[in-house]
């Protein structure tokens, strides 16, 4: 998983990274890809030979967007997300690895401040509904992405609220180091308790 902060000028680098590390699945947040034809060439350059790209661009404005680069021999099917998610962008897929199904949910939540930000209370309302739907969904669950909370600050009210929600839904958070240049932990990886061994 990585935050690209624009794939437009990094498409070749991302493609080389994917093949150099023999990555099976690469979740990308902040692709900054747009709808329509404008970024067709970038979408063509991003997946190296043997890979495919699936992405959800931001519907309006600049920035945002989530994507998945994956080896083309994998069975990857985009899933319909029933819950409203105006406060975050999401791509949900079901991966059939022959030995198991993995439901991957890639999230980008813009900061609450700024033109595209919405109050964190709305995010918690929408994310709770989404987790309700995922609770009975098939497949081993892997939720990952940029949540834009300073997760290392356990005294922060929003972090407390998120931790409570993870506890309620029996989810473990696996990132233990900073994921941001200012030593913040903004990116999270979540699994159901007991499912990490299957995902490894």
Image (cartoon, helix red, strand yellow):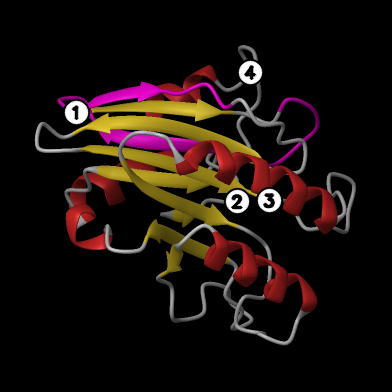
**Residue 78 visible to an observer of this rendering:** yes
On screen, 121 above or below 25? Answer: below
**Residue 65 visible to an observer of this rendering:** no
- Label 2 or label 3, whichever lies nearer to me, is 3
Instruction: State the residue position of label 4.
Output: 38
Q: Based on the picture, tell me whether residue 107 belongs to the magenta stretch.
A: no
Q: Which residues are magenta?
A: 59-81
- Label 4 or label 1, whichever lies nearer to me, is 1
Q: CA distance from mark 4 to mark 1?
A: 28 Å
Q: Considering the numbered disc 4 on the image, is that residue within a helix, a strand or a loop?
A: loop
Q: Are marks 2 and 3 in contact (CB under 8 Å)?
A: no
Q: Nearer the viewer, residue 98 or 164?
A: 164
Q: Nearer the viewer, residue 37 or 159?
A: 159
Q: Which label sits on residue 109?
A: 3
Give percent across and percent down for residue 60.
Answer: 79, 27
Q: CA distance from mark 4 to mark 3?
A: 24 Å
On screen, 163 above or below 13? Answer: below
Q: Considering the numbered disc 2 on the image, is that residue within a helix, a strand or a loop?
A: loop
């Amino acid at each position: 998983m990585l935050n690209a902060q624009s794939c437009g000028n990094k498409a070749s680098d991302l493609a080389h990274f994917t093949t150099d590390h023999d990555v099976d699945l690469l979740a990308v947040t902040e692709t900054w890809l747009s709808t329509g034809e404008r970024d067709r060439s970038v979408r063509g350059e991003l997946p190296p030979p043997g890979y495919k790209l699936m992405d959800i661009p931001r519907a309006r404005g600049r920035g945002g967007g989530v994507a998945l680069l994956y080896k083309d021999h994998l069975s990857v099917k985009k899933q319909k997300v029933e819950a409203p998610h105006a406060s975050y962008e999401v791509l949900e897929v079901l991966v059939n690895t022959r030995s198991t199904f993995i439901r991957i949910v890639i999230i980008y939540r813009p900061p609450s401040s700024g033109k595209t930000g919405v109050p964190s209370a709305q995010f918690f309302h929408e994310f709770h509904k989404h987790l309700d739907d995922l609770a009975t969904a098939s497949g081993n669950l892997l939720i990952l992405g940029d949540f834009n909370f300073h997760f290392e600050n356990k005294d922060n009210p929003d972090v407390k609220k998120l931790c409570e929600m993870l506890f309620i839904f029996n989810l473990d958070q696996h990132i233990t180091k900073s994921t941001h240049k200012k030593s913040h932990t903004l990116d999270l990886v979540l699994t159901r308790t007991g499912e990490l061994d299957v995902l490894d």
